Image (cartoon, rainbow, N blue to C red):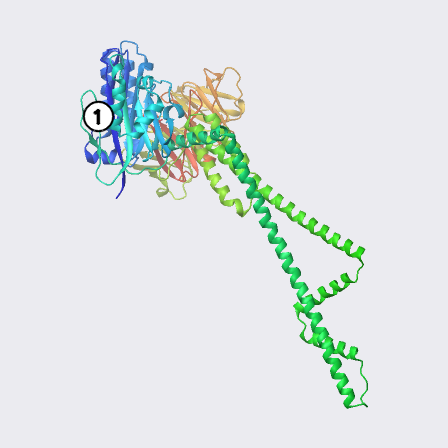
Amino acid sequence: MNQLLTSISKLSMDSGKSSAVCDAFVAKPKPELKSKLGTIVGIIELFAQPDEFVDKFFEIINDLETEYYLPPFETEGGIEKRFEECLQRANRRIHKAINDSVIELEPKNINSLVALIHHGKIYLSQIGQNNALLFHRKKQYDYIIVDIFSQAGDKTSKINSEKMFSNIINGAITEKDNLFFCNDSVLEYISQNELMEIITEESPASALKEIESILKKDSQDNNFYAIAIEPVIKEDKFTEQLIVSANNTMPEIEKPRVPSQTSINKLISTQENTEKYLAPSMAPNWKKALVITVWGLRVVTKFIIKYLKIISLEIIKLSKVTFNYIYHKFAKQKLNNRDTSTINSDQSLNPNKPTIDPSENTQTSYSHKLKENKNLFDTISDFINRQITKFVSLNKLQKSLFITGLVLIFFFSQSMVWQGQVVTNSEKTSTSDIIKQIEDNLNAGEAKNIFNDEAGSKESLQLAINLLSQIPNNNKYQATKNELQSRIDDLNRSLQKIVYLDNPETISDLFNQNESADLSSMTISGNYIFVFDNNNQNIYKIDLEKKQTIAKKLPQNFSNVRKIAAIDDNKVLLLNNDSELYTYNLETNLAESSLTNKDKITDISLYGGKLYALIADKGQILKHFPVDTGYNSGSSWIKDGTDITDIVTFTIDGGIYTINDTGNIKYLLSGKLMATNFSEVNPAISSPKQIFTDGDSSYLYVLDQNNQRIIVFEKNSGNIKTQYSSKEFSNMKSIIINSKEKKIYVLANKKIYLINTDN
């Protein structure tokens, strides 16, 4: 049975100069691991770096290889997820190595490409500047060249010492594709077109040998490193070939399958579309003339065939009418002759018989027979005969006017038909143009999204949305509209970085504690989560380690508690709808009033042992210090008069983030408003339930209850990091974020869910 297999070869030509340390590598896992997890390949190029860092960097890449093939071997999260986690660990180690270096390092002098090849699927990530070329065959001897990193916006990616491997480009290759990775030195001596001819005409091993012979004369002063990859169809077991000109490494084996289409294929499509739109302008004029001539002949032929058919039908109709007229005239004459003969015979035999007018008798007999045998067809024929008789009786002038009128009526009616056809065709053309424009905008939006042009992608998406509303609402276009709407939704989810969780992990099901539970708020202290139930005035204490839930009934009714905050593992602050604040002790089962102020408290938060209370109606946040009786009367925290009267909730990380009902976020530091630029969210935030961050987190979390999602913003840039949503997140009440353990706890639908994050 035919199977798509991959041949991989590498080339290493080292000049031996100490200013640059380079390598090209291909992992050598066991055959069963290679089949299950794929093969890791890469190129490393370090310039003017201290020996300690060089050794550490090569050790980190070697560890990345080793860790990728360590157990467990289950790939539930997917091969890409496994590869991404290894890159993340490598990022942390590289960042530490840079920080630990005594000598200041230049990250821009670090170039490294790491790729995973698994069953014909490619995953690429890079540091600095590298080259990844894709030679895609459209037809025999007709190739396009795709510079993957350049088209994906990663050719010279910005160096971030915390995220050296910052992006993964993934895609599929078929037997129509060849991949070539190399450092910049190779492209200085061999052009992309020349490389394409060599790589596509020979096997990877032979191609790299030819490239080696071309570069050999310049190898004393330069380092050349390359990896060639070719998917081929084989019927038998295939051996992956590896050549290393420096040390003659033996071949390896690779057995991938045919992959699915992903982002690299979008790059191919983008390149093909570009060539397709450029091609007509380069065509010779005589070809254009020939195309136009053929098109014109087709139109004329269709016109003649169309109206020849109409004329033929009219002639046939006229022939039928003429035949019917002649037939009836002949039958009438024959009947008259026969009746006249009969009458004369009767008269001679019986002279006394009254004489009968022959014409009268003939007419009566003929009319009688017509009445007996008349049917619908005869009626129509009679009507036509009468009209023909009337026409024949007209003089020449009257006949001419009548014929002219008929011709005018014919052309008028035909013009109405033509006009209707033009309108219909115009509508079809207009709708087709709109559909084409929508598809073009979506294609552009998807390509811009791949190339990290988020603003341009959003603009194209909005144009597609506006055009979609112009397609008529009828069954003819419904399937097309549904398909386009699906593509719009997919692109919007990608731009909004929405992550849908089908089955989020359940930490605790409080429905089992109380089927009619009215859960209002949730807080955490150490390994314990606390949840308050207004239905039965219970507070639930969930032990995260033991997975146990303890219910404690409060000694009195606290009138709809809406916010709780943990002081420690056994003490919780309770804020009710009457703005009364209590400290509840789970060990003693006692609650004491903690604040004597009569202000209307909108929200509370604990930070550094102090209580912060939002008094929205007075446009102030009060800072309270702990005292023996709870907390003191507090002092005003806002110093510059910033208007916060519309604020619904807030959170603290040293400064204070606030949010109002429409999702407008403000940041205040030392009591003064600071400039922020948080991205707009689609759909817009509506009546947020909670906002959270802390000093250990680089992110701001917003619980958007109405849209069943948690939005994660980057605090520094204001950009959306991700959005979490699930069908399970109905009736969301509260969230807790453990920044150090990278966990989000969600209280929704009488359950507590866990989301493991990378944030």
Residue 563 position by quadrant: top left
For badge 1, the amino acid type reads Ile
* Above or below for 663 versus 389: above
From the viewer's perspective, is 171 left or right of 248? right
Q: Is residue 629 visible?
A: no
Q: Which one is nearer the viewer's eye here, 562 or 686?
A: 686
Q: How many marks?
A: 1
From the viewer's perspective, is 615 left or right of 304? left
- Label 1: how many Cα within 10 Å (few below 14, some 14–19, many 20+): many
Residue 587 image point, x, y percent: 32, 31
Q: Which one is nearer the viewer's eye here, 639 or 593?
A: 639
Q: Can residue 350 be seen in this view?
A: yes
* Above or below for 310 versus 88: below
Q: What residue did someone put label 1 on?
A: 243
Q: Residue at 70% across / 71% down in the picture?
A: 330
Q: Residue at 74% across / 54% down in the picture?
A: 403
